Image (spheres, grey):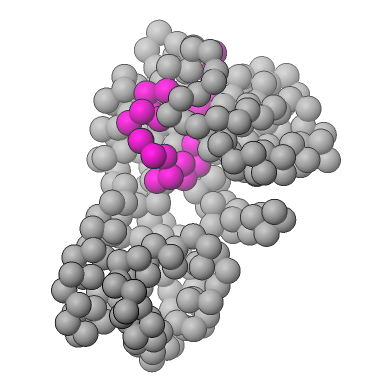
Amino acid sequence: MNHYDELPLWSAPFGAALLERVRMHPGARVLDVGCGTGFPLLELAQRLGPDCRAVGLDPWGVALTRAQTKARRWGVGQAAFVRGCAEDMPLPAGVFDVVVSNLGVNNFADPAAAAAECYRVTAPRGQFVLSSNLRGHMAEFYAVFAACLRDLGLSEALGALEAHVAHRATPDRLRTLLEGVGYREIGVTEGSFTMRFSGGRALLRHYFIQLGFLDAWKAVVPTMHTARVFAEVERRLEQMGELTLTIPWAVVEGVKAA
């Protein structure tokens, strides 16, 4: 389970941007939806102080155990953890002053249902803040991947790749998601960061890339062609030398009416 803590290397830039939008009120009641092993919940609980009440929700019991261990070791007694899914939260309505979700929207089975549940548990005049990577992330990699599929005559796989890329969030889609469940005063902040690799070999062997992305990339290619396609992708990326991948992000904030 300790290896899961590599994920903040990916989620920290999004979480830092999210934290900039959270109202910092002592005694606030906070919910982190999809809290994983405790980031950014434990950081937020400490910033809000010992009088706050911070709850982390996640369906993954092993991750929650890890988060609980951190909370004890760090002395964050105001944090508690609940096992459950975003689409059907085992929590009462209207009790949280702040609801956050760092990168959760791409992982919810039903984003609209999850957003509706977030709205239900938000207190009147409460705030919901979510972060997400956006369509166009890692565009430098996807351009090479698509070129390989075209050159190898794999038009069906190219269509599957285009669908994979298109499923990512956009700022307008996220705004519509929040407005659709009732949030108002919608605000959107956008930015980007980069991830640099020495080349394609390093990228495709990086632990987090293998954990979070590689299986989905391979799934767009028929199994009989996977080895050939990724050998070609790696070869072309290596020819490019140092590889810089751009990661666009958005933080979207909404307020529940009084």
Quick check: can you spot residue 85?
Answer: yes
The question of residue 106 being in magenta is answered with: yes
**Relative to 251, does residue 23 appear above or below in the rendering?**
above
Could you say where residue 241 lies in the image, as x and y percent from the top left?
43, 88
Residue at point 45%, 11% (across, down) = 124
Could you say where residue 128 lies in the image, as x and y percent from the top left?
45, 27
Quarter of the image with the N terminus is: bottom right
**Relative to 112, does residue 169 appear above or below in the rendering?**
below
Residue sitting nearer the eye, 92 or 19? 92
Residue at point 34%, 85% (across, down) = 228
Quarter of the image with the C terminus is: top left
Quick check: can you spot residue 22?
Answer: no
Residue sitting nearer the eye, 3 or 184? 3
Kindly indicate the quadrant of the structure image that contains residue 166: bottom left
For residue 76, side relative to residue 173 (left or right): right
Residue at point 67%, 21% (across, down) = 53
For residue 137, side relative to residue 203 (left or right): left
Residue sitting nearer the eye, 36 or 170? 36
Task: Give the magenta range.
Answer: 95-117
Kindly indicate the quadrant of the structure image that contains residue 158: bottom left
